[in-house]
Amino acid sequence: MLRFTARNYARIAQAAVTRRVPVYAHWGITHRCNLTCKMCGIWRYGDENEELAVAEIQQMAEKMARLGVVQLSIGGGEPFASKHLEAAVEAFLGQGLNLRVLTNGVPEGNGRNVVQGRDYLARIDRCMDLGLKNFSISLDSLYPARFDYICEAEGAWDAAVRTMTQVSSRLYDTPGAMPTINCVVSNLNLEELPDIVRFASDIGFAVSFLPVELLGDPKEGVRNWEARFIRYRPEMGIGSAEGASQVRARIDRAYDQLLAMKADGAPILNSTPYLEASRMYLKTGRFPPEGCDAGRLYFSVAPNGQFTICHRTVHQHLDFLDPGFEEYFHSELYERRRKLEAASCEGCMRACWIDTSSMFRTMEGFFETAKLTLKRRSGAPLTFEQARERWARVDQAPIVPEGAQPEAAAK
C-alpha cells in the first residue's frame, strides 16, 4: 500500500517513540456529494463557497509535510465534486506524502449531478497519471439492488464496480498500490462480509470494514459535531426480532470468518485488534476502552481549512492555514485543549483513527499491516463484465435479509 521514503520512515520511528508526530491526516476537500446514502448526511452541508483555492491547497500540503504527516486521505463528501482535486493530488504527492482518495465510485446519482459521468473515469485516470496509487471505493453489498437502495441511486453498484475494475487494470502490478473497498457493516450485509472479501481479492482490491453508526432517535438532535453527519436508519441498525442471542450469533459468525480469513492472508486491511473491537461494538454498542490519540498521531481538516483533532470534536483551534498554526500545534495550550477534548469524547469506531493507534500500540497491528502491503498479487484483474457475471447477486433477496429485521437503530 505504501512505499515510504527515508524521511517517512524517520517520521514513523519518531511517532512510535513519542506518539506526538501526526503521521496520518484526513482532509475533507468538500462536503458536496452526488449521493445521499442512507446512513450519511454530510451532503446536506456541502457548500462550494467554503472550499479552498488551489494556492491554499498548496500551502496546506507544505504545512502537512513540515508537521510530519506521512499518510493523507482526501475524502468528502465526494472528492471528485471538487474541481481542484487533481491540483490537490499533485500538491500533496509533490510534498512526498502517501496519498489516498476516498470516492464513492459513482459518476452521478439521484439527480444530484455534482460529478459529471462523462468526465469521472477520465479524471480517475488523470489522478493515476499524476502518480496516485491508492483509492478507497465504497461498496456495501454484492446485491446491486441492495447497494442501490443504500446509496439511493439506481445503477450505483454497476458504476462503483466499473470504477474499481478501471482502477485495478491500471494499478494491479504497481508497487506501493493497494486500492481498497470501504464497506460499512450493517444489519443489511452481515452475512455477506466473507464474500465481499473474496470479491475484493478477485478484482485486485483489499477491503476495510467499518461498523455502521446511526442516530438512535429521529429527534435526537446534535450530540456532537459528527452527529450532524449521521442519520436515523433503523433498518440498518444491528437488531433482530428473534432476540439478542440471535443478533450476537450473527455478528460472531461474520467476524469469526473475517478473523480466520485474515489469519489465512485474505486482503483485509483492518488489524485483528480493530476487528475484535468492531465485533464488541456491534454486540454491545461500547467503543474501545483504550482511549485515542486524536490530535497527536492523527487529525482532521474541514473543507474550509478548519483544524480539529477528529471529526467528533468542536472547532476551537486555529485554522490550519493560520500563519501561527504550527507554533500553536506544538504549544502547551494546544496540548491542554487536545487532552480535554480527547478525554471528554465518548469514542468512535473510525477505522483510520483506531487502526493507526493500534499500529503504534501493538506490534501485531503494525506487522499485520506491513505484511499485507508487501504481498504481491498473482493472476490478472477482472474486467467489469467478468466481475458482474461472477459476483453480482441477482436473485430476488429482500433488501433487509429475512430473519434480520431490526428492533431498533444502533446506538
Image (cartoon, rainbow, N blue to C red):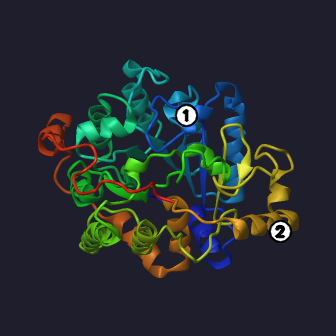
Residue 331 shows in this picture = yes
The quarter holding residue 89 reads top right
| Nearest to the observer: residue 12 or residue 405 | 405
Residue drawn at x 24%, y 51% as measured from the top left: 401
Q: Earlier in the sequence, mark 1 or mark 2?
A: 1
* Image spot of residue 352 (x, y percent): 52, 59
The quarter holding residue 310 reads bottom right
Residue 4 shows in this picture = no
143 with respect to 58 (left or right)? left
* Image spot of residue 238 (x, y percent): 38, 59
| Nearest to the observer: residue 328 or residue 63 | 328
**Which amino acid type is marked by label 1?**
Trp
* Image spot of residue 37 (x, y percent): 44, 38
1 with respect to 379 (left or right)? right
75 with respect to 157 (left or right)? right
258 with respect to 15 (left or right)? left
Mark 1 in CB contact with mark 2 (< 8 angstroms): no
**Which amino acid type is marked by label 2?**
Arg
The quarter holding residue 371 reads bottom left
Residue named by callout 1: 43
Q: Quadrant of the N terminus?
A: bottom left
Residue named by callout 2: 336
Residue drawn at x 42%, y 45% as measured from the top left: 135
| Nearest to the observer: residue 225 or residue 391 | 225
